[in-house]
Amino acid sequence: MTPEAPARPARSRWRRRQNVVAFLLLAIPLTGVLVFRLLPGVASFGLAFTEWPLFGTPEFIGLANFQELMRDDVFWQALRNTVYYVVVSVPGIVFISLGLALILNRGIRGIKIFRTIYFLPVVSSMVAVGIMWRWLYNAQYGLINTGLGFLGIEPINWLGSSTWAMPALIIVTVWREMGFYMIIFLAALQGVPRPLMEAARLDGAGPWQRFWGVTFPAISPVTFFVSILAMINTFQAFEYMFVMTDGGPRNATLTLVYYLFQEGFQRFSMGYASAIAFVLFAIILLITIVQWRIGERRVVY
């Protein structure tokens, strides 16, 4: 026992140093979260109860901004557009990215090239993607209408029609986002137990039965995670509307975030924009809780 006594202070100092290093490493990202996330969020919540034209002192007006939102037809249209965008985009992203992952998880020739091709849109600039697709959708010389013309289909005014503008943006969203979620699904598919797959194969289960009986239960937590992440991201859609349609035509692609941008940074009504942001936060939080409750019953951990 006597020889170990001098080592204890040294060990204690080493642990204290470890604790200090760990604290410093944690302090850097936590400071970023506090300064760039929590404080702006709290400030935005406070501004929602004020009238602030950006230049001047905010004036407290209570719930007036929220009461005005309830009477604002443009807000309700933006909410309907956002729900439409999310309800169509999220299933499209989940199903297509899962399908691609299932295909690319097989040992076919040139698989790495295909994985790279599908992932390239993810690392491309959203603005560049928007400009490219705006050219593809062009009603007069766009490649999509040219291709439809070969099939005998009349040209479609994709971005100039209130009927087709939102579906056009949804196609772009699914095309760009599917590569990111495909990578997540590919990682999950690598963890599917091979003995279970072999046992199901020996029992005579076909591909569809193996997918529903083995693969899907194994990746259900990842599917649940992808669904929530895609839902949150699509609720915050802004870039495509900004670059491709400017919220038009006739507000057909005006989403809540784009309306927030218009009120805050074009009309300088920061209090009203903060009220929109708070309503959007409440909607996303409520839907996430509902998804979480449903996921507890369906997801296999």
Image (cartoon, rainbow, N blue to C red):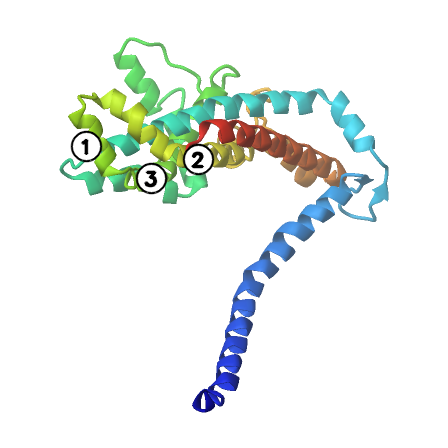
Q: Nearer the viewer, mark 1 or mark 2?
A: 1
Residue at left 23%, top 32%? 197
Classify mark 1: helix, strand or loop. Answer: helix
Q: Amino acid at mark 3?
A: Ala
C-alpha span from label 3 to label 1: 18 Å
Percent from the top left, x then y, of residue 60?
Answer: 86, 41
Residue at left 45%, top 36%? 225
C-alpha span from label 1 to label 2: 27 Å
Q: Is residue 171 visible?
A: no
The residue that label 3 is drawn on is 188
- CB atoms of marks 1 and 2 within 8 Å: no
The residue that label 2 is drawn on is 226
Percent from the top left, x then y, of residue 67?
Answer: 80, 27
Tell me if mark 1 has few (under 14), some (14-19) or many (20+) residues whose alpha carbon lies within 10 angstroms of its own: few
Instruction: From the viewer's perspective, tell me whether residue 197 is left or right of residue 250.
Output: left
Q: Amino acid at mark 1?
A: Glu
Residue 198 marker = 1
Image quadrant in which you'd find residue 255:
top right
Percent from the top left, x then y, of residue 153?
Answer: 33, 9
Classify mark 2: helix, strand or loop. Answer: helix
